[in-house]
Amino acid sequence: MDRFIIRGGRRLSGEIEIGGAKNSGLKLMVAGLLTSERLRLSNVPKIADIQTMRDLLLRLGISVDEVDERTFSIGGDIASIEAPYDIVSKMRASILVLGPLLARAREAKVSLPGGCAIGTRPVDMHLKGLEALGAEIRLENGYINARAPNGLKGDRVILPFASVGATENLLMASTLAKGRTEIVNAAREPEITDLVNCLNAMGANITGAGSGTLVIEGVEALHGADYAVMPDRIECGTYACAAAITQGDLLLIGGQADSLGSVIRTLNETGVDVTEEQRGLRVRCSTKLRGIDIMTEPYPGFPTDMQAQFMAMLSVAEGASMITETIFENRFMHVPELNRMGARINPHGRSAIIRGVEKLSGAPVMATDLRASFSLILAGLVAEGETELSRIYHLDRGYEGVDRKLAACGADIARVHE
Ligand SMILES: CC(=O)N[C@H]1[C@@H](OP(=O)(O)OP(=O)(O)OC[C@H]2O[C@@H](n3ccc(=O)[nH]c3=O)[C@H](O)[C@@H]2O)O[C@H](CO)[C@@H](O)[C@@H]1O
Ligand SMILES: C=C(OP(=O)(O)O)C(=O)O
């Protein structure tokens, strides 16, 4: 298993290229299941999750041809309706093939994803929503067996919580349903707008993206399209934290302020300067960070996927901070690891009090999930001495070239292969 060795204490300065969004690219690939024509996706990030999604589509009989390093041409006829346990257990986003398989093949067998390090993550809203569209669903031997022999029918679905995944599954399924579907309390994340734009480019008829109510008029068939994956707002926010914690100055090429409103406001509150330039976002910090309170919320609130990175930053800020996590019930796995590096963080239920310390010290630490891993890198970048981060396969799921990007801006970080 690969590890990172980080020697802290270097100020970062330079430029970092922001890639295509993991949480959009994965869903856009799945949208390729909805047509027999080719969906050509560009700006696809080179990360392990995208490779896993490619493996899953291949198992379903769909071809995913590499046009160039970051462009896939996806298409073909569905040859299997089964998303097997060995792939779904690797990556939860695999559940998103359920809706499209039902819509196009009228049948699906998808392994139940189960929980993960950050929470139990049930899929009840996905299933209830698809049942409302006429699917018959049975849970057997760890699998979701779903059928819609006469096709799906549009209806009004009210989500009890604005779940990103449930919104996406229902959205894709309803593009080919008979009649009109309304998804009320739909998630408003920018990645959903990206999916809507791609589906509309494929011939779907969807309105209301970003508003909380999506209206889908079902069509007979979708066709091929060319579409570019949006830039990764979480990768961009993560490197903004790297600039902030090292008192650095980074230009994040391709970063967009409009999808990062709450993150930028929060950075400003801690004393970090963020400005939009022609090529991206410049993030600069020249004062000691200030402690603040943060609560994670669905978009446009502060994203849970940035919570761990801000916790690392606030652990060296002046004064006390409080972070409240409202989206996942167990997303503080980084706390004991940060504390091993000298942070003073006290979690209690859904909240954690962070008392800023003067300095952190390098230590061997372990990555537990994708964003938690990066919070430990951030801590390592400012810690005195050496930090050895193990289990970085979590990080490889969603960040491309972390060591290359950070080292090019002055960080002392190396990947050790074993
Ligand atoms: C691949 C991807 O895009 N992942 C993102 C997606 O995950 P994901 O789509 O899994 O997140 P959801 O918005 O669905 O989940 C939010 C909360 O709702 C709960 N829930 C969800 C569905 C359901 O049927 N029942 C239920 O109880 C979950 O357990 C969780 O506590 O959105 C999350 C919230 O912004 C992000 O942190 C993830 O990075
Ligand atoms: C939680 C995340 O991803 P996933 O939903 O794929 O676990 C994430 O991107 O931070």
Image (cartoon, rainbow, N blue to C red):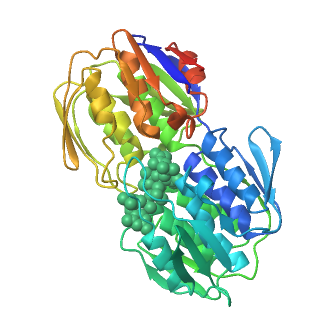
Image quarter in which the C terminus is found: top right
Residue at 40% across / 56% down in the picture? 299
Quarter, ligand 1: bottom left
301 relative to 413, above or below: below
In the rendering, at what x and y percent does residue 205 appear? 65, 76
Counting labels gives 0
Residue at 51% across / 81% down in the picture? 182
Q: Quadrant of residue 265?
A: top left
In the rendering, at what x and y percent does residue 76 appear? 83, 64
Residue at 72% across / 77% down in the picture? 105
27 relative to 346, above or below: below
Q: Is residue 272 visible?
A: yes
Depth check: 107 or 202 in front? 107
In the rendering, at what x and y percent does residue 314 appear? 27, 30
Q: Is residue 284 visible?
A: no
Depth check: 356 or 129 in front? 129
